[in-house]
Amino acid sequence: MRSVHLVRKDDHILYSLQPNSQFQSKTTWLEHVELVHVATPEVDLEEVVLSTSFLGFELAAPVMIAGMTGGTPLAKKLNLIFARVAEELRIALGVGSQRVALQFPEVRESFSVVREAAPSVPIIANIGASQLVEGLSARAIEELVEMVRADAIAVHLNPLQEALQREGDARYAGFLDRLHELVEASPVPVIAKETGGGVSREVAKKLAETGIKGIDVGGAGGTSFARGEGLRAFVRGDALLYWLSEDFAEWGIPTAASILEVRAAASSLTLIATGGLRSGLDAAKAIRLGADVCGFAYPVLRAAMLNGYEGAHAYMRRVIEGLRRALFLTGSRTIEEFRRAPVVVTGVLREWMAQRGLTIP
Ligand SMILES: Cc1cc2nc3c(=O)[nH]c(=O)nc-3n(C[C@H](O)[C@H](O)[C@H](O)COP(=O)(O)O)c2cc1C
């Protein structure tokens, strides 16, 4: 049992680094969002302020390193890099699923290192929907939070991935009731987080009714867990799961559409956007559609694997500086001003909005 979980976690890191673990034909649809250029910004680039409050902290920019890993020596190294970058740049940080640390306390340190290295930024703990459905004791919830001295806990929704794993745990019946119980029992706010499938307006409404604090849309267009599972099935020679993974590899609501969906259902929830964001300009577009904070997974993981702390730091700086320039070029001094910047939506995103009755906030 132990080796299955530990090996699977490094598998995920290694498979997710393969270029074909990303969506191939479906995109985030952010390319259909055009911010209108302002030739006379009436603000100096250095004057632009990106600071944003999030979970009671003042972030230097509305940006985070999304939850990815923990549980192995490689994961510990990566978490340490991510935490140092988050602390240095004053951005938020998530950890990967802590399920393994509940089962094997000896790997707790691979998660707890993040709080030592990042004492002054918000950290989000992480557990899976299936674990919640199986049942989490009050003690286990406390343990997850204490492990990283978390400021919030994310419950990840990955029904597609679970349905494509040989050892998957595709148990979702009763989930919303369990989520409500978690909200009542948790010492910190709860966030519901998709992982590449996106969240619809209907789902966001049900999630909001449980009393959660926020939703991470985890939209389609970036990392595809179906593709990752397909690679694992191929290596194992499991033809059924390989072909099923191929069939569902492009499944999901693109990130741009999902942000609009969630915003339409839940105007006061904290909205995190992950899923295929690759630059500060992508982050700007996500914010203009209604996101509060933008999360990055695959590109910062790749940068850390290739060039360690320097690589991850350089990547996240590029994101922040890109976001600053997007505000400058739309004549916005602050994120609040930027939320009113003119925007044009084209193509398939516009069609989706028309059919679903969605508008730009
Ligand atoms: C290697 C890897 C592991 C991940 N593990 C988790 C996890 O344990 N829990 C979770 O909520 N999301 C996990 N994610 C999902 C990310 O947080 C993010 O929502 C998703 O990858 C989309 O962002 P991206 O396109 O920037 O990678 C993982 C992503 C990657 C790449």
Image (tube, grey):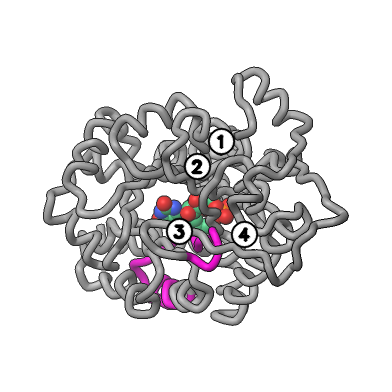
**Residue holding disc 4:** 18
Disc 1 residue crowd, few under 14, some 14–19, many 20+, Cα 10 Å: many
Which SS class for mark 2?
A: loop
Q: Which contiguous range is marked in magenta?
A: 59-81
Q: Can residue 91 be seen in this view?
A: yes
**Mark 4: which amino acid?**
Gln
Instruction: In the rendered view, tell whether residue 283 sits above or below residue 208.
Output: below
For the residues labelled 1 and 2, say whether their Cβ atoms are less than 8 Å apart. yes
Instruction: In the rendered view, tell whether residue 217 sits above or below residue 208.
Output: below
- Residue in the image at 22% along x and 43% along y: 182
**Residue holding disc 2:** 217
For the residues labelled 1 and 4, say whether their Cβ atoms are less than 8 Å apart. no
**Residue holding disc 1:** 258
Q: Is residue 97 left or right of residue 145?
A: right
Looking at the rendering, which quadrant does residue 73 occupy? bottom left
The mark nearer the N terminus, 4 or 3, is 4
Task: Give the numbered dot on residue 53.
Answer: 3
- Residue in the image at 38% along x and 74% along y: 120
Q: How far apart are marks 4 and 2 (CA)?
A: 23 Å
Q: Is residue 242 left or right of residue 6?
A: right
The mark nearer the N terminus, 4 or 2, is 4
Q: Distance between the residues labelled 1 and 3?
A: 23 Å
The mark nearer the N terminus, 1 or 3, is 3
Does the residue tagged 4 have its C-beta within 8 Å of any atom of ligand 1?
A: no
Q: Is residue 61 part of the magenta span, yes or no? A: yes
Is label 1 or label 3 in front? 3
